Amino acid sequence: MKLFPLKAGEEKLPLERYITNLIKVIIIPLVLVIVVVMGILFWYAQRYSAILKNVTTASEFNRNFKADIDLKMYYYVIESQYSAGLPTEEVQYAERLAKSLLLTTTEKDSVTAITSVINLSGNLRDKINQVARTDNYKDRQMQLENNIYVLTDLVQTYMYDYLYYEAAHLNKLQSTITLQLEMMMLGITLLVVLLLLILVSKSRQLSRRITEPIEDLSKRVKVISAGDLSEKPAIQASEIEVQALSDGFERMVKHLNELIEKNKNEERHRRTAELALLQAQINPHFLYNTLDTIIWLIEAGDFERSVQMVGSLSNFFRFSMNRGNDVITLAEEEKHIRSYLEIQQIRYGDVMEYSIDIPPELGQYCLPKLTLQPLVENALYHGIKLKRGKGLITVAGRQEGDCIELTVSDNGAGMTPKRLEELLSALREGSELGFGMRAIHKRLKLMFGEDYGIFDISSAQGEGTRIRVRIPMWLPDKGESVS
């Protein structure tokens, strides 16, 4: 790689100085141009918005103004049963509308037209009141034809003239804005071209001094992103900043390797500890009580059930150990909980029944061992045993899309709403409440991702509890990766 050594007397931070100069040469002129352009555009936008508002407001003028006023006045004059009184409100509305338009109107022709509307509206109001004061029918008819009809026609005509002038002014202003924008864009383009030429001239030397080491750093990043975290010598550069970047990058790679290895060891130990704690959840009294039950069955001469219980106990601990593997198939997990429930049914046959419904085609997929057993144990000791009469524990599995949903439910004592909320909070926050369930949830998320684990807990006091677990359809023996 070609290096650019410092010249005699040259400062060691040329990159900072170059950047400062480039900011002065490029940014300041651009900011000034942007401020000017924004000011012009803002002024034009204000004018355009004001005229457009006038046109919109004027469009609210009643298109049938003359016809409505003339008809109402005619009914009033002939004293028709359809007469609704004098149309003074319509005239006042037109007058108020015109006065509001006058406040923001600047064009001479538009001002003249809207002023005429205001004056004519006032005159029309006076003439309407004059008709109201006139008793003679013939005089009313004459005033209606010579005054009212003429004034309503003039009000409507001048309002339409106002709309025409404002629309024309709006179109003219739009053309002016378009022309100004074209001129400003041309000026900005020329300025940008000039600034780019200056930028190229000022940054040429700087580019040569930093591009090559940056390219080497980019290649290094690609190698690391491909998974190669092997340590390499730092890239040599003439710029202190680039050299510091390269040195720090290699230190980061070294530190990253150390952290990865440390995390692997910690994760390995944590998984081992959690599994050990889960296995420790199997109460030693369970073994003692089971052996006592076996002795009692033998003494009672019930050899068939005692043999069955010994076999179930043997299967239970064999599946618990699983040759030290942390991951087992769903079929093995099913056998594990079946052995556990067979033992417990012999012990608590008068209070417990169970049902396992997991389709055989799902048995090939894998999950961490001791995922369902703690949930089944909770269902027995915190649900069924606290219920009066015989209870039922149900374990079910089904495919949902590309996932498997496992359900452990019971019709036991259930939980109070407060206890259910405590349990849900413990799962969300990772607190110590209900360690077995929390550990299951965390291990599933750790192994498969945030979309998996215990995703639903429902319970009602006196009705039972249902816990639902989601796992992916994972076949590690076939080379599939964990989601």
Image (tube, rainbow, N blue to C red):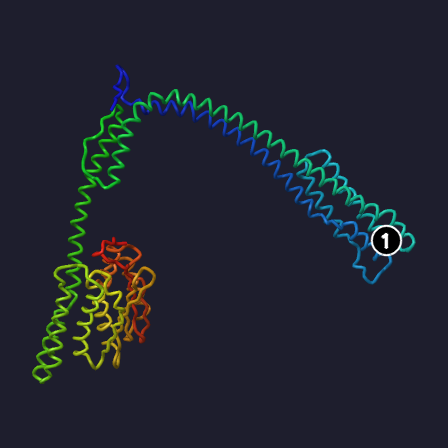
Q: Quadrant of residue 437?
A: bottom left
Residue 471 drawn above or below residue 17:
below
Question: Which amino acid lies under the numbered mark 1 shown in the image of this protein?
Answer: Arg
Q: Is residue 344 left or right of residue 58?
A: left
Q: Residue at x 26, y 69 (%)?
A: 358
Where is residue 184 drawn, in percent x and y?
Answer: 55, 28
The residue most toward the top is 8
Residue 186 drawn above or below residue 313:
above
Q: Quadrant of residue 355?
A: bottom left
Q: Is residue 141 left or right of residue 310?
A: right
Q: Residues within 10 Å of mark 1 (few under 14, many from 20)?
A: few
Q: Which residue is labeled 1 in the image? A: 133
55 vs 314, nearest the viewer: 314
The residue most toward the bottom is 300
Q: Disc 1 on helix, strand or loop?
A: helix
192 vs 139, nearest the viewer: 192
Where is residue 12 drawn, in percent x and y?
Answer: 27, 21
Count of marks overlaid on the render: 1
Where is residue 215 drawn, in percent x and y?
Answer: 29, 30
448 vs 126, nearest the viewer: 448
471 vs 246, nearest the viewer: 471
Q: Is residue 439 left or right of residue 80?
A: left
In which quadrant of the rendered image does the C terminus lie? bottom left
Q: Is residue 116 left or right of residue 222?
A: right
In which quadrant of the rendered image does the N terminus lie? top left
Where is residue 290 drawn, in percent x and y?
Answer: 12, 75
